Amino acid sequence: MIKPALLFSCILALGFSAQADTLVMPEGSATAAMPASLPGKGQTMGEVLKHFGQPQVKHAPVGGDAPKHPPITRWDYAGFSVFFEHSHVVDAVVPGRPPEVYHADQLQQASSR
């Protein structure tokens, strides 16, 4: 038979082992400023122009000096940037927004302030 004091100690220890994580959102991250959709990977420059119009800034390509270094071009729109390898989208990002997390092992503990 379990002694009441031992049972109470076990229950008390379980209560102290509970832990909560804190989700910290970057300051100034407003979801209202986020575009409803972003260009998808693999879309062509023509498809991006048709759907999103002319970018505010078209940066000159960088790289392209070797097959292992294809030319990368960036177009900046209001609220997001699109990166192309040759003429196809490789990524579209919202500055200041953390990347999407697809696996639990990518999560990081919030730093204490």
Image (cartoon, rainbow, N blue to C red):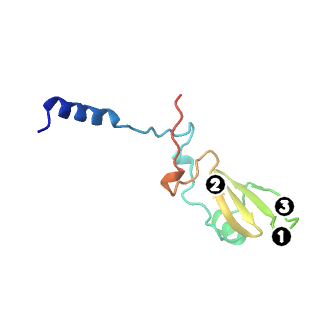
Please state which of the two labelled residues, at mark 3 or mark 2, is closer to the viewer.
Answer: 3
Read off the residue under disc 1: 67
Q: CA distance from mark 1 to mark 2?
A: 25 Å
Q: Give the image location of residue 76, x and y in percent.
A: 71, 54
For marks 1 and 2, the one nearer the N-term is 1
Residue pointed to by mark 3: 63
Callout 3: helix, strand or loop? loop
The residue under the point 57% across, 54% down is 35
CB within 8 Å, label 1 to label 3:
no
The residue under the point 64% across, 48% down is 95
Do callouts 1 and 2 mark residues in contact (Cβ within 8 Å)? no
Q: Nearer the viewer, residue 101 or 58?
A: 101
Crowd class of label 1 (few under 14; some 14 to 19; many from 20; radius 10 Å): few
Above or below residue 58? Residue 32 is above
Q: How many numbered marks have been drawn onto this rendered protein structure?
A: 3
* Label 3 environment density (alpha carbons within 10 Å; few <14, some 14–19, many ≥20): few
Asked whether, in this view, residue 72 is left or right of residue 90, the answer is right
- Residue 20 pos. (x, y %): 39, 38
Single out the mark in the foreground, 1 or 2: 1
- Whole-percent x, y for residue 24 in the image: 50, 38
Q: Is residue 48 left or right of residue 57?
A: left
Residue shown at the point (61%, 66%) measured from the top left: 40
* Cβ atoms under marks 3 and 2 closer than 8 Å: no
Q: Amino acid at mark 1?
A: Pro
Residue 53 vertical position relative to residue 15 in the rendered view, above or below? below
**Sequence order check, earlier mark of 3 and 2:** 3
Residue ID for mark 2: 93
Amino acid at the residue labelled 2: Val
Left or right, 12 with respect to 69, comes to left
Q: Relative to residue 84, is residue 21 drawn left or right?
A: left
Quarter that holds the N terminus: top left
Q: Secondary structure at mark 2?
A: strand
